[in-house]
Image (cartoon, rainbow, N blue to C red):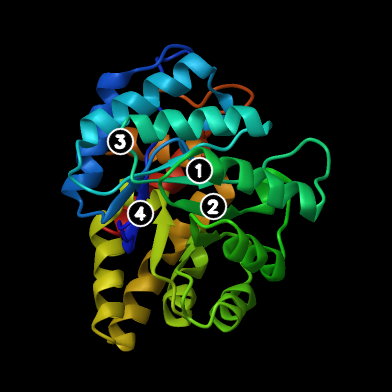
Amino acid sequence: MTTTFHGIIGYTVTPFDAGGETLDLAALGHSIDRLIDGGVQAIAPLGSTGEGAYLSDREWDEVAAFSLSHIAGRVPTIVSVSDLTTASAVRRARYAQEHGADAVMVLPAAYWKLSEAEILAHYQRIGDSIGVPIMLYNNPATSGTDMSVELIMRIVRQVENVTMVKESTGDIQRMHKLQQLGEGQVPFYNGCNPLALEAFVAGAAGWCTAAANLIPDLNQQLYQAVLANDLVQARALFYRQLPLLEFILKGGLPATVKAGLALTGLEMGEPRLPVFPLDAPGRARLAALLEALR
């Protein structure tokens, strides 16, 4: 468990045919190459942007195996293995490890509201089943489960291979508290695009973002400015891309990123129902935002 993650961690989309039914693995390969060519420091397949929750087990396996094979160690990988049941999350975690993932990401998705004991047991069972690091992912907007910083730190201390935290609530105070309670020893990552600058200033080790599919140069420039402690330049770079970052978040990651990739010449198909593709006014707005950043 020696891989360290930092910088821009790019989410992949999962391409489908025009009807949103059949996987298009060739297009997935092109999108992975674009992320790597854009300079991402790591890639995270099958997260929210990758519509992992809307794939059958067979499809999930195909996307995971293809992604890891195509990335081929060119950058580190974090595969999202989240699922409603612990057994399925364990199966996915083992599958990802067997196919070369450097780490897995676990979001405690739930239908029934989970107690803290149930959440801890979920992570313990997954941690006991694999030998790669786990990124604990807190995103109540998609999972229905909001973990307090105290619970997160309890999980980190009790599950040996939970070694990092992705925080996506959009509350910068959570990141400050992670720094304090973790005594600066627990790497945390920003998952909320409009919070990128504040998160880096608060000590985030990286930024997990779908925006790397569309504006990789600006994302990298922001990260490099932060590394150089050039906050004047970092602020200018952040506010330049903020309108697009906000649009991506509000418009929904699969719909906006797939539409943006199509506008740049890489057709990814439509999101899978029940998610709608971006409508005509939304595509026009997205096109204008991308043009302004050229």
Label at residue 1: 4
Rendered view: 65 above or below 203: above
Q: According to the image, label 2 marks what residue?
A: 249
Residue 16 placement (x, y as % from top left): 41, 19
Alpha carbon separation for disc pair 1 and 4: 30 Å
Q: Are marks 1 and 2 in contact (CB under 8 Å)?
A: yes
Please name whichever residue, 289 or 140, is drawn nearer the observer in this view of the structure.
140
Report the Cα–Cα distance between label 1 and label 2: 6 Å
Viewer-side residue, 252 vs 64 = 64
Specify the amino acid type for callout 1.
Leu
Q: Which residue is mark 3?
A: 100
Which circle marks residue 253 in the picture?
Answer: 1
The nearer-to-camera label among 3 and 1 is 3
Is disc 1 placed on a helix, strand or loop?
helix
How many badges with numbers are in the image?
4
Specify the label residue 35 is tagged with: none
In space, the residues marked 3 and 1 are separated at their CA atoms by: 26 Å
**Residue type, label 3:** Gly
Query: Looking at the image, is mark 4 or mark 3 earlier in the sequence?
Result: 4
Disc 4 to disc 3, C-alpha distance: 13 Å
| Mark-to-mark CA distance, 3 and 2 | 30 Å
Q: Earlier in the sequence, mark 3 or mark 1?
A: 3
Give how far across and how far down residue 259 sits, in percent. Answer: 41, 35
